[in-house]
Amino acid sequence: MSEHLVLRVVAKLLIPFILLFALYVQTHGDFGPGGGFQAGVIFASAFFLYGLIFGVENARRVVPPVVVRGLVALGVLIFGGTGVAAMLMDGNYLEYAVFAEDPAAGNHIGIWLVELGVGVTVSAAMIAIFLSFTGRQG
Amino acid sequence: MDQAKGQRLILTAPDIVLLTLLLVTTIALARLRNLVAVIMLLGLYSLLMAVLWVSFDAVDVAFTEAAVGAGVTTILMLAAVALIGREEKPHRHNPLGPLLIVVATGAALIYATAEMPRFGDPDAPAQQHVAPRYIEDGPRETGVPNMVTAVLASYRGYDTLGEITVIFTAGIAVMLLIGARRRKREGDQ
């Protein structure tokens, strides 16, 4: 178990910061560079690092494939659901302006939700592909 | 063509260095037969592209290129190589035919660039169409200062929905094609 001691320690230190950075990119895509897509990929890369250092079996225990499969679909549902929610509030599909009194504020809410959907699907899809590729050897 | 306004119409020295490195990387990529080395060079290629995007002020694209091209795909391709083996199979076909096609296509593409507007030209059709409206009204209409996010998530929301559907399909397809076999094998044991 003492193999790659340096890698294990460094990875344990880095993973929380990578996850935190992913969340920062996710929630600040409207003010700085980035957004759901980049955040999803960074989030997945923290998981890849964990899988590479601590083994794929441990990684599967952290995020079971069943959960990943659900999340891949959930992100698309959040995106599509935002559009349907706009329709229920007497707007067009994906017309975010109806979410608030002020159209700009409504747009901001809509963009935030849609980016969340993108982030969830992208990170889950990347993790699903990683687990599929690495799972075949085991 | 008004350079006094601060528009960049020419490549700077760092850009030329980066493009040269990009060319060297591409030639090395075509010649290498060791797939692990090829993947490392592809990562390097993406990293160089990311720096180039930063130099072109396309920070969001650079971010994506660095995270996806240099980061995630490198690991995914390494995982794929672990399944298929490290060495490329030796070629048995005559390279002359493909070379002719590649040279002809390349010549046509270079010929076509002569008709393209100059790099960063403010009079180019791409800068004249809807871009000025997004730049002027985007922050007010969407409440989002980052124009790239405003265009991706709001003005072009349908396109982005299509894009994540593609990623969704890719994830599902890989799980069905590769992931399912593992479960079957576990069931056999």
Image (cartoon, coloured by chain):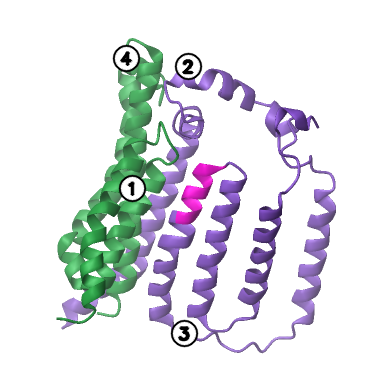
- Badge 3 vs badge 4, beta-carbon distance below 8 Å: no
A113 above or below B172? Answer: above
Q: Chain of mark 2?
A: B
> What's drawn in magenta, residue-wise?
B58-66
- Contact (Cβ within 8 Å) of mark 4 with mark 2: no
Q: Is residue B147 above or below residue A107?
A: below
Element at label 2: helix
Pick the residue in front: B30 or B15.
Answer: B15
Could you say where residue B114 lies in the image, as x and y percent from the top left? 85, 48
For badge 1, the amino acid type reads Thr
**Which numbered dot is residue A121?**
1
Residue assigned mark 4 = A100
Q: Are marks 1 and 3 on the same chain?
A: no
Q: Nearer the viewer, mark 1 or mark 3?
A: 3
State which chain disc 4 sits on.
A
Amino acid under disc 2: Arg
In reply to whether residue B59 is colored magenta, the answer given is: yes
Q: Say the numbered circle drawn on residue B140.
A: 2
Q: Residue B86: which disc?
A: 3
